[in-house]
Image (cartoon, rainbow, N blue to C red):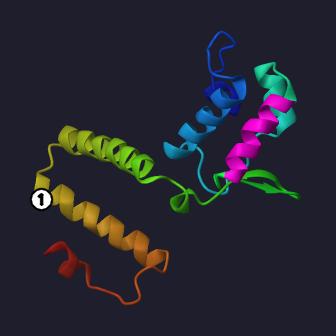
Amino acid sequence: MLAHKIKVDPTNEKPLWQQIEEGVRNLITAGILAPGNLILSVKELAQELKINPTIVAKAYQRLVESGLLINNRWEGMLVANTQRYLTTREQQYLLQQEALRYALVVNDLGVNKEDAITQLKLALHTLRFKNGKLRFAVKLTQLASK
């Protein structure tokens, strides 16, 4: 599961805890680990990576301190709402990656730029409305014409 996505290399000059921290951070930034996801316990990840649990504990603790993970006593280690904790650089990187993915789909479908932008605006409007970030309703036809 998580261990298959995180690679640690004992010959790397970076300490193992730092490799784990960066691996988890990258998975969160890329959206592979979403807010609320339960991740492996320290013991489970240590067993899968075949390393000392204190190494995993240090990486997790640093991620908790940076606000990316939440240590919930009853549920375990959860991914926090990262929107608040991503740096501007991380947000830009993630946005660029997702924009590229969307552009590839648009290109493969042969959709023109205006229709692609309209669909993106409609999707953003729908998400924000569902999440309560819009305080009033706007007709979708008005949004599409902007």
Q: Amino acid at mark 1?
A: Glu
Tag count: 1
Task: Please state which of residues 99 and 19 is positioned toward the viewer in this rendering.
Answer: 19
Task: Please state which of residues 122 and 84 is positioned toward the viewer in this rendering.
Answer: 84
Query: Would you identify the image quadrant in which residue 59 lies?
Result: top right
Tell me residue 74's x, y (percent): 88, 58
Q: Is residue 142 magenta?
A: no
Determine the residue located farthest toward the bottom in the rendered image. Answer: 136
Number of residues whose C-alpha sits closer than 10 Å to that of mark 1, classed few (under 14), some (14–19) or many (20 or more) = few
Residue 127 relative to residue 22: left or right: left
The region drawn magenta spans 54-65
Residue 28 relative to residue 124: left or right: right
Query: Would you identify the image quadrant in which residue 122 lies?
Result: bottom left
Tell me residue 98's x, y (percent): 36, 46
> Could you say whether the residue bearing mark 1 is in a helix, strand or loop?
helix
Tell me residue 62's x, y (percent): 71, 44
User: Which residue shows up at 87% across the image and 33% down it?
Assistant: 43
Task: Please state which of residues 93 and 13 is positioned toward the viewer in this rendering.
Answer: 13
Quarter of the image containing the N terminus? top right
User: Which residue shows up at 59% across the image and 34% down it?
Assistant: 22
Note whether 26 is above or below 122 in the view shown.
above
Residue 145 relative to residue 83: left or right: left
Quarter of the image containing the C terminus? bottom left
Query: Would you identify the image quadrant in which residue 5 lies?
Result: top right
Q: Is residue 64 magenta?
A: yes
User: Which residue shows up at 60% across the image and 32% down it?
Assistant: 23
Determine the residue located farthest toward the top in the rendered image. Answer: 11
Tell me residue 67's x, y (percent): 65, 56
Which residue position is annotated with label 1? 114
